[in-house]
């Protein structure tokens, strides 16, 4: 699968088969996150792999929109250091997207669960032992999809302008 195909076909998956993610595939997903670009190559991220079902359930319980994480065979928490980069949120978001696309290309489903600045960020930080000076940017549920999803996008002609906003 090429990158354009992965971008166009990836969807947020919230239902997963009850089978584990092989370690070699997990490593490829994490490598995709590690190789994300970052401002001044700061790489202000850490990834916490959530393998323990009890921890995933506890994290899912305190999230607003991520209850399905409890049923996923795997989760990844993306942690950023706001002091390590001039653009830590953007850097961590790119790492998250790289992992979503890599997982899709490897036959897995994922869903980005936003955490940065959410009401559950501090609760999840406590559960996962994330230091006070770090931020939880996102949680990713990962597994073999037990559903398929469709999505539509606006036509380019409706969202692209030339030289100035509104100029077709």
Image (cartoon, rainbow, N blue to C red):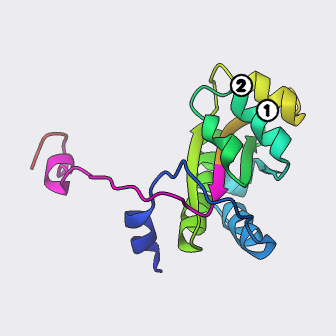
| Label 1 sits on residue | 58
Residue 89: give x, y in percent of width and height: 62, 39
- Give the quadrant of residue 142: bottom right
* The quarter of the displayed image where residue 19 is located: bottom right
Magenta includes 73? no
- Residue at x-position 47% and y-position 57%: 147
Q: Is residue 126 left or right of residue 103?
A: right
Q: Residue 148 location, x and y as percent?
A: 43, 59
Q: Which residues are magenta?
A: 141-164
Magenta span main SS: loop
**Can you identify the residue that label 2 sits on?**
62
The residue located at (74%, 45%) in the rendering is: 77
Above or below — where is 166 with respect to 148?
Answer: above
- Tell me the residue at 54%/47% (across/down): 14
Looking at this view, name the residue that lies furthest to the front: 18
Please say whether residue 87 is visible from this viewpoint. Answer: no
């Amino acid at each position: 699968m090429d990158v354009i195909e992965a971008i166009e076909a990836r969807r947020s998956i919230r239902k997963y088969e009850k089978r584990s993610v092989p370690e070699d595939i997990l490593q490829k997903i994490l490598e995709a996150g590690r190789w994300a670009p970052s401002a001044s190559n700061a790489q202000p991220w850490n990834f916490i792999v959530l393998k323990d079902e009890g921890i995933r359930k506890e994290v899912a319980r305190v999230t607003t929109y991520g209850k399905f994480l409890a049923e996923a065979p795997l989760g990844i928490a993306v942690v950023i250091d706001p002091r390590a980069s001039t653009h830590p949120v953007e850097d961590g978001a790119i790492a998250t997207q790289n992992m979503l696309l890599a997982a899709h290309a490897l036959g897995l489903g994922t869903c980005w669960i936003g955490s940065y600045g959410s009401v559950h960020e501090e609760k999840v930080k406590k559960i996962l032992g994330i230091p006070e000076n770090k931020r939880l940017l996102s949680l990713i549920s990962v597994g073999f999809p037990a559903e398929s999803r469709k999505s539509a996008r606006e036509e380019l002609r409706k969202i692209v302008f030339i030289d100035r906003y509104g100029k077709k």
